Image: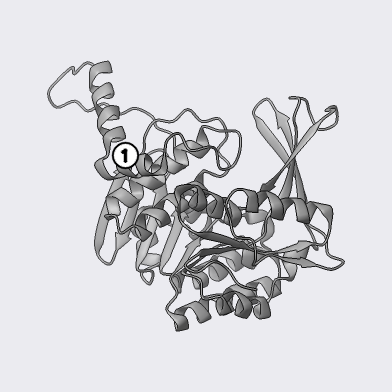
Amino acid sequence: MSIETGAVACIGETMAQVVPSDGKRLDDAATYAMTPAGAESNVAISLARMGTRAAWGSFVGDDPIGSRITRSVNERGVDTSLVRAIMGGRTGVFMKDPIPDGSDVYYYRSGSAAAGMDAEYAHEVLATAPRWIHMTGVTPALSASCADMVQQLTQGAVASRIPISFDVNYRPVLWPSREVAAEAIRSVAAHADVVFVGLDEARALWGVVTAEDVRELLPEPMRLIVKDGAVECITFSGTDRVAVPALSVEVVEPVGAGDAFAAGWIHAHLLGLAPDACLRLGHLMAGIALSAHSDTGELDAAPSEIVGRAVDGRDWKTHDENLAAAVPVLAPAQETRTPNATV
């Protein structure tokens, strides 16, 4: 088992997402669409689209669903040689039932092949010498063996000086309690080089209030990226703090925006861009995902142009100019804010 030299290895479960394709509810639809859905494969797909070599690794069942998921991710430019089809295993599935205010989701995941990922698999991944490893807080919640894999991957990457990024991605339904999740996720995050976390999930998980509180709780990562919803995203690097405000986005579907942000940030960082440009590329990639029905969306321009927009900040300048033109200044000291939507 080997991956393309210099690839970012994104390790974690991807399931089959089934949704009605005729706009009806699950119990009344006549046709359905099936697509891959998983945080790590989402990141890999977005990285590949931007031009960064990316691999996705996981266990799937040796069933048609596992084969279809693997092929679908591979067709999007991602190296899938790390994927193992487990004989007799089955691939996790979830179904989305559209309702007026969003979607109800039904998971058929328990005992999936991906829950069998273990420490041995971690050693196999490390043996391929990836350029970078990306994981999320979903994986250690799947099973004890998955938690062991994450620990082994983390320890092995540190020993081999392979950078690790970790997206907290707190999913309460997967954990026995908030206390167990808080300790387990903090332990992994403390050993990562880069950590992504939403301020809302940090509040729910650790009871913190501000982005600075999160940094105080997680002083170990070289870079901590805190996503404050519609307000801004902040990078803490040592004692340095860099923030970039959110842009206004018409939200079609929020799922996958955090993954797109992580991919944008990683891509920019690997290009050697400045911290503010890394945040801006994260914002731009998240906006693409927010504006689409799929988890990853489609690029709205050539990768080089999107990177250029992140470097020069033209979208933010245009946003500020439009805001100034649309909102009359009533008094010299008055400030006006408009709601934004982002990760």
Q: Is residue 319 visible?
A: yes
Q: Dot 1: within a 10 Å radius of its alpha carbon, few (fewer than 14), some, or many (20 or more) residues?
A: some
| Residue sitting nearer the eye, 42 or 144 | 42
How are the residues colored? one colour
Which one is in front, 340 or 295?
295
For the residue labelled by badge 1, is the local secondary structure a helix, a strand or a loop?
A: helix
Please state which amino acid type lies under the numbered disc 1. Arg
Image check: 20 left or right of 174? right
Task: Count the labels in the image.
Answer: 1
Q: In the rendering, at what x and y percent does residue 247 appear?
A: 36, 34
Disc 1 designates what residue?
309
Between 49 and 60, the residue placed more toward the observer is 49
Q: Quadrant of the N terminus?
A: bottom right
Residue drawn at x 28%, y 50% is: 276
Q: Residue furthest left?
A: 332
Q: Nearer the viewer, residue 3 or 101?
A: 3
